[in-house]
Amino acid sequence: MSAWLWLAGLALLLVLLAALALSSPIEVEAYAAYPAQPPVQVDVRWLYGVVNLEGLGPSAEEEPEAHPEPEPKPPAESAQPAPERQAPPEPEPGPAPEAETRPEAEERGPEPGPEDEDESRLESALDQGVEYLETRKDVESKVQRALAVLRTEDLPLAVTRMLRDLVHAVHVERIGVQAGFGFGSPAQTGKVFGQLTAAFAWTHATDKIHVDLQPDFHAVGFEAGADAHVHARTWKLLRPLIVFALAPPVWQAIRNARGGSDG
């Protein structure tokens, strides 16, 4: 009886943990800036902060280490003048050495003739041709596989439905945009600033989107930054993915891809 109680308690604990994981929100904060290193940084929190992933995104480029300049060396002391070199004595005339002995010539073997060169060129051309045909066959197979997937009936509709449900599941807490710019001409900078202010005038009606424009009427340059904070319930994100994975067009696309690869 006690074993059944332990199993029931363990099953209840697993159900509670699964319910907690599915109901907990996934919070994502993203930052982007130009010019900056790294340009994009993403922080993800799940299970009410138990899982915290910070600094996701492309890593910053490592700056090259600064090499110290070599210290100037003190001038070398003046050396004593070297004695004049004497020319080596001329060798006495004698019998000229033989160009090549007979055994060494036999070891080298006959030199390759034009027929051997033509044969090696033909083999190299055949190898290149075979490699080209194999590469072309591989590319054609991949193209046929992609076309077979794209031609699957109702697959674009299933993808569009999944993306729409994912967008609806995400709640935007804040989106901020900051930009500073200058064109060196006060008139040109003021004109662009007025056009951008009119284009983003609708953001004043909402508290979730903030746009901060800072014109510089004297300098030339551009810098921008953006930040976003969104969250979504885990089960709301998993539901569109599960529905998409179980959709008949997806399974048909997998079968078409296998048929295209086999053919």
Image: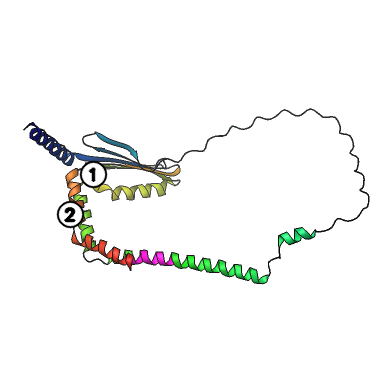
Picture quadrant where residue 48 is located: top left
Residue at 44% of width from left, 47% of height from top?
185
Label 1 belongs to which residue?
A: 204
The answer to whether residue 56 is seen in the rendering is yes
Please name the amino acid that badge 1 sits on.
His
Q: In what element is the residue under mark 1? A: helix
In the displayed structure image, the side of residue 53 where residue 9 appears, left or right? left
Q: Tell me where residue 7 appears, x and y as whole percent.
A: 11, 36
Q: Which residue is mark 2?
A: 243
Quadrant in which residue 18 is drawn:
top left
Q: Main secondary structure of the magenta part?
A: helix
Which residue, as the protein is rendered here, is positioned at the far front?
103
Query: What residue appears at the point 12 percent right and 38 percent down from the top-left corner?
Result: 11
User: Is residue 54 shown in magenta?
Assistant: no
N-term mark: 2 or 1: 1
> Residue placed at 39% from the left, 67% from the top?
140
**Does 21 appear above or below 248?**
above
Residue 12 at what x, y percent from top left?
11, 36
Q: Is 187 left or right of 160, judged from the image as shown?
A: right
> In which quadrant of the rendered view does residue 227 lie?
top left
The x and y percentages for residue 190 are: 38, 47
Image quarter (top left, top right, bottom left or bottom right) of the C terminus = bottom left
Q: Give 168 or 173, whichever is nearer the viewer.
A: 168
- Amino acid marked by disc 2: Val
x%, y% of residue 193? Answer: 35, 47
Q: Which residues are magenta?
A: 135-144
Q: Nearer the viewer, mark 2 or mark 1?
A: 2
Position of 166 relative to 37 (above/below): below
- As helix, strand or loop, the secondary structure at mark 2 comes to helix
| Number of numbered labels in the structure image | 2
- Between 58 and 172, the one nearer to me in the picture: 58
